[in-house]
Image: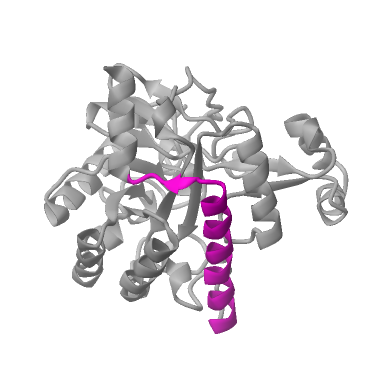
Amino acid sequence: MADGISPNGRAQTRRHRPRPGSPVAWPDDFGTRFTLFVDTEEEFDWTAPFDSASRSTSAMAALPDGHKRLCEGGGAPVYLIDHPVATAPAAIDALREVVANGGAVGTQLHPWVNPPIQEAICATNSFPGNLPEQLEAAKLDTLTDEIARAFGTAPRIYRAGRYGIGPATARLLADRGYRIDSSMRSRYDYGGHGGPDFRAVGNHAFWLDRRAGLAELPLTTVFTGRVRAGGERLYRFLGEIPRGRGLFARTGMMARVAMTPEDMPLDDALEAIRVALGEGVRVLNFSFHSPSLTPGFTPYVRDAADLKAFYGWWDAVFALLARRNVQAASQSDLIVALDRIRA
């Protein structure tokens, strides 16, 4: 929990460990669906310290073509945009084209490039939920207003940059009319970097504030392999053994697989989809970073061959989802379903 800012400008925090609330009981006729939330952001050096001056959005030029390919495969992307994207005219133009062709726009808060910048720029403060509540709120208001001004409608889906949700975030979102948060990455722990611990969070959607209509839709992550029933406890134990997790993954014993083409091999992802469906997950939540649509901007797509593999990953994933009759859920589909549950 953020307690304030110390004299050196660093947030003073205690680790945030979210726990699931009451589950969202999706209507029977909603079926089993999948979502695609894209972290739509500036380009930066992934190996360098955080830098408020890194605001280039040239990779956004690839977004309209990428959107077309994803939609042709069966996706319904929602682009969660941060402040550099929301204030760059060329990026806004690209997104307006995407919205005109069935896309939707939400919010992603990267605090180190989002005014007002009153904090020290450091790893701890890169998780927006670590900031004092007033500063987190001010940054959220700045970004929400910029998006509403650019697109004529207030955003309704939010993701904290670096999955950095904090103890005040849900209340801040509910007060501003947000309906879905997707800041929690199921089964991951960012505590070693000063961020939240999501090891207690599973893959089922749950209510953050049912009265306000605010639901959490975690990024889907499952354990696969012959001993996957060992779950979080076994995976935590393997982390205490040198190269234990890598050995179990290579031998097909156990792997942790998130629903993203970034650093997740295709065969593992296909098996993870089968496992998630077998576990009764009603909404599978996929994600990637928008600069991956252009070679050279992320570690995951370094050249043309990587980009071809990136789209091949999606082609195979969409094909499996279609065979299993798992259809895309748009932003509108999700909000309409949530409203029906609350009625």
Residue at (87%, 44%) from the top-left corner? 241
In this picture, residue 282 sits left or right of residue 145: right
Q: Is residue 92 visible?
A: yes
Q: Quadrant of residue 93?
A: bottom left
* Chief SS of the magenta region: helix
Total marks drawn? 0
The answer to which of 280 and 109 lies nearer the viewer is 280
Residue at (51%, 53%) from the top-left corner? 322
The answer to which of 93 and 52 lies nearer the viewer is 93
Where is 115 relative to 51, above or below?
above
Where is 128 relative to 112, above or below?
above
Q: Which colour style is shown?
A: one colour
Say if the magenta span includes residue 34: no
Residue 257 in picture, x, y percent from top left: 66, 48
In this picture, residue 184 sits left or right of residue 114: right
Residue at (85%, 46%) from the top-left corner? 253
In this picture, residue 69 sits left or right of residue 202: left
Q: Quadrant of the C terminus?
A: top left
Where is 165 relative to 150, above or below?
above
Q: Is residue 172 visible?
A: no
The answer to which of 136 and 145 lies nearer the viewer is 145
Q: Which region shows up in magenta? A: 304-330
The answer to which of 208 and 142 lies nearer the viewer is 208
Q: Residue furthest bottom?
A: 304
